[in-house]
Amino acid sequence: MTPATPERIRQDCRVLGQTLFNLALPSMIRRAVVIAVVAALWLYACSRILAFGATVRYDFLRTLGQQPVDYLGRINPYLWWAVVLAFTLAVLFALRGWLRASLRAGRATEVSPQTLAELASRLSPDVIEVMRWAWRYREEPFTIGDLQVAHRETRSGRVDKMYLARDQEAALTQPPASPSRPAGERHAEPSLGRLA
């Protein structure tokens, strides 16, 4: 089989990338909407926290003296900014966890046989071989994650590596050429010599 040309490999990479984009677009839109909603709610909650903090008075602590009340009045904005910071960190960690789970679920999404058939009709045999290579667990359906691996590996030269591996396999399966030795001649064993 003749290897695909570099131009054909680049074209196949574009086809793989376009297919990946089309398959991932609904999930990307959903993630963008969720992030935008969370950001809007976070901004609203932070403004409410700071607005509430601006109204807090510590006059009920006057029994402890005027000095603690004055001190708390001076640091009051910093206290509420600390609350906002803690709230922000909680939101970020929750959002990051959700985003990771969403990306993991997206990679595990199965690719329909119709999509694979349509894709295979547009790809060179070499890139189809890379897709087969990326699909490591044949007892499981082909997923978007497998397609991402095939796309990444095609871009990084997997086709050339597969041809090199075939050449190496062929070189190892040929019988080794042994040097001819005259009959009856033995190979001399190394000796340490006589100790004095």
Image: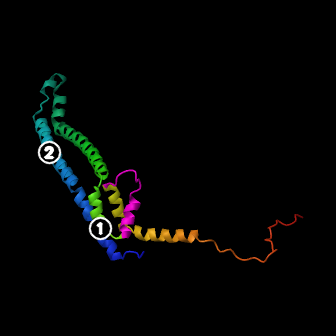
Residue 121 sits in quarter? bottom left
Of residue 168 and residue 194, the one placed in the foreground of this image is 168
On whether residue 137 falls in the magenta region, the answer is yes
How packed is label 1: few (under 14 Cα within 10 Å), some, or many (20 or more)?
Answer: few
Q: Position of residue 103 (x, y in %)?
A: 28, 50
The label nearer to you, 1 versus 2, is 1
The span shown in magenta is 125-143
- The secondary structure type at the circle numbered 1 is loop
Residue 153 appears in the rendering:
no
Question: Which residue lies under the disc numbered 1?
Answer: 121
Q: Is residue 22 left or right of residue 129?
A: left
On whether residue 105 falls in the magenta region, the answer is no
Q: Position of residue 154 (x, y in %)?
A: 36, 67
The quadrant of the image that shows the C terminus is bottom right
Of residue 123 and residue 92, the one placed in the foreground of this image is 123
**Residue drawn at 21 percent across, 54 percent down:** 28
User: What type is the residue that disc 1 sits on?
Assistant: Ser
Looking at the image, tell me whether mark 1 or mark 2 is earlier in sequence order: 2
- Farthest right residue in view: 196
User: Which disc, if any, is residue 43?
Assistant: 2
Q: Position of residue 185 (x, y in %)?
A: 81, 74
